[in-house]
Image (cartoon, rainbow, N blue to C red):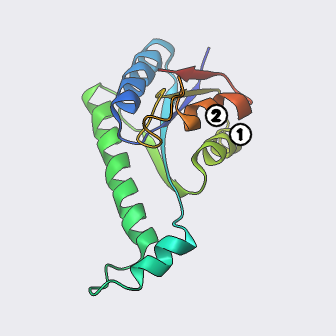
């Protein structure tokens, strides 16, 4: 059965439900859970816009990393409330689907559980969100979309 579950987490309602499912499977199988939050590196346009602000908000990447860290801490708290302790959690920058799949291969994950739609691309008409769709298409391990 499964020994290592990767739960990509973005703080959306669907990713909350995916964490619940990961916790259930972990309890059934004894699999460990690793949380991963991926934030996108800001574009050059965003960088140029940040230069015209009166107050220096700091680096956009720093702000995004700080937000992602808060998101991952919330995910760890949800898993703790579900009775899952000793969760490893990582924050990465990059293209989410690619980063998720590369992480899964590099860390010996044998199941990915993620939400069907996250926080991005709302209303784009897809049945699955673009990240979950890309992860399922690229993954070398089973993917459970919740």
Asked if 5 appears above or below 95 in the picture, the reply is above
Q: Is residue 39 something one can see in this rendering?
A: yes
Q: Secondary structure at mark 2?
A: helix
Q: Which residue is mark 2?
A: 135
Q: Viewed as shown, does residue 25 lie left or right of 102?
A: left
Q: Quadrant of residue 134?
A: top right
Asked if 126 appears above or below 44 in the picture, the reply is above
At 36% from the left edge and 22% from the top edge, which residue is drawn? 20
Q: Viewed as shown, does residue 141 lie left or right of 59?
A: right
Q: Quadrant of residue 13?
A: top left
Q: Which residue is mark 1?
A: 105
Nearer the N terminus, badge 1 or badge 2? 1
Dividing the image into 4 quarters, which one contains the N terminus? top right
At 61% from the left edge and 30% from the top edge, which residue is drawn? 133
Q: Secondary structure at mark 1?
A: helix
Residue 23, how many percent across, how many down?
A: 40, 23
At 48% from the left edge and 32% from the top edge, which residue is drawn? 33
At 43% from the left edge and 38% from the top edge, which residue is drawn? 122
Q: Is there CB contact under 8 Å for labels 1 and 2?
A: no
Q: Is residue 139 something one can see in this rendering?
A: no
Residue 95, how many percent across, how many down?
A: 61, 52
Q: Dot 1, crowdedness within 10 Å: few (<14), some or many (≥20)?
A: few
Residue 64, how many percent across, how many down?
A: 41, 62
Q: Which mark is residue 19?
A: none
Q: Dot 2, crowdedness within 10 Å: few (<14), some or many (≥20)?
A: many
Foreground residue, 119 or 28? 119
Residue 15, how many percent across, how many down?
A: 40, 32
> Marks 1 and 2, how far apart in space?
12 Å
The total number of labels drawn is 2
Which marked residue is nearer to the observer: mark 1 or mark 2? 2
């Amino acid at each position: 059965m499964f020994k290592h579950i990767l739960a990509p987490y973005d703080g959306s309602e669907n990713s909350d439900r995916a964490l619940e499912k990961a916790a259930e499977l972990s309890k059934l199988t004894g699999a460990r859970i690793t949380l991963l939050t991926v934030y996108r590196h800001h574009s050059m346009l965003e960088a140029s816009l940040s230069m015209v602000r009166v107050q220096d908000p700091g680096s956009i990447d720093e702000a995004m990393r700080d937000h992602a860290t808060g998101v991952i801490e919330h995910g760890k708290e949800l898993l703790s409330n579900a009775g899952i302790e000793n969760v490893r959690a990582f924050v990465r920058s990059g293209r989410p689907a690619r980063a998720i799949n590369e992480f899964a291969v590099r860390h010996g994950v044998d199941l990915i559980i993620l939400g069907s739609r996250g926080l991005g691309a709302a209303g784009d008409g897809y049945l699955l969100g673009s990240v979950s769709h890309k992860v399922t298409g690229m993954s070398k391990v089973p993917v459970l979309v919740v």
